[in-house]
Image (spheres, helix red, strand yellow):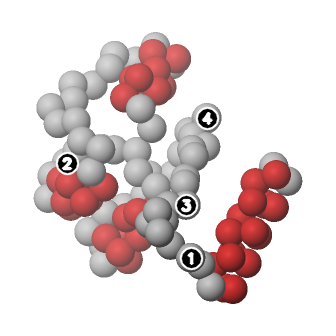
Amino acid sequence: MPRERWQRLFDEVGVRRPGAPIHSGSVATIRGLLACSDFLSLLSRDQSQVEIDAGLLTVIASQVPETMRMVDAIARRDWFPTATPTRFLTLLREAARGR
């Protein structure tokens, strides 16, 4: 979630924006900082499940509007998929069109 959206969440409820001493797009950095500090972040549960399961992080139950994001499938330029990845990509495309 871009920083502006994060800050807008506070603006929309009339709460002063918190200071943000660290800005990072690296999931590994964010997970590490959260595990050893009192920082707060918006992070996909899937990206932090290992730390949650280990008791290092906890989920704060909340509903954050407009948090849908785009995730891409990426491959090497010279990649020639076998039947299984071809089928997987076909299913992804069909699911995306169905949205």
Marks 3/2: CA–CA distance: 34 Å
Return the residue at label 3.
Answer: 73
Horizontally, is 87 left or right of 56 in the view?
right
- Estimate how packed mark 4 is, as few (under 14), some (14 to 19) or many (20 or more) residues with alpha carbons within 10 Å: few
Amino acid type indicated by mark 3: Ala
Q: Residue 68: x percent and y percent? A: 61, 43
Residue at 20 percent of width and 54 percent of height: 29
Q: Nearer the viewer, residue 41 or 72?
A: 72
Return the residue at label 4.
Answer: 66
The numbered mark, 3 or 2, whose residue comes first in the sequence reads 2
Residue at 26 percent of width and 68 percent of height: 56
The numbered mark, 4 or 3, whose residue comes first in the sequence reads 4
Marks 1/3: CA–CA distance: 14 Å
Amino acid type indicated by mark 2: Asp
The numbered mark, 1 or 2, whose residue comes first in the sequence reads 2
The numbered mark, 4 or 2, whose residue comes first in the sequence reads 2
Amino acid type indicated by mark 1: Phe
Q: Which mark is residue 38?
A: 2
In the displayed structure, 12 sits above or below 28; it is: above
Horizontally, is 22 left or right of 46 in the view?
left
Furthest-right residue in view? 98
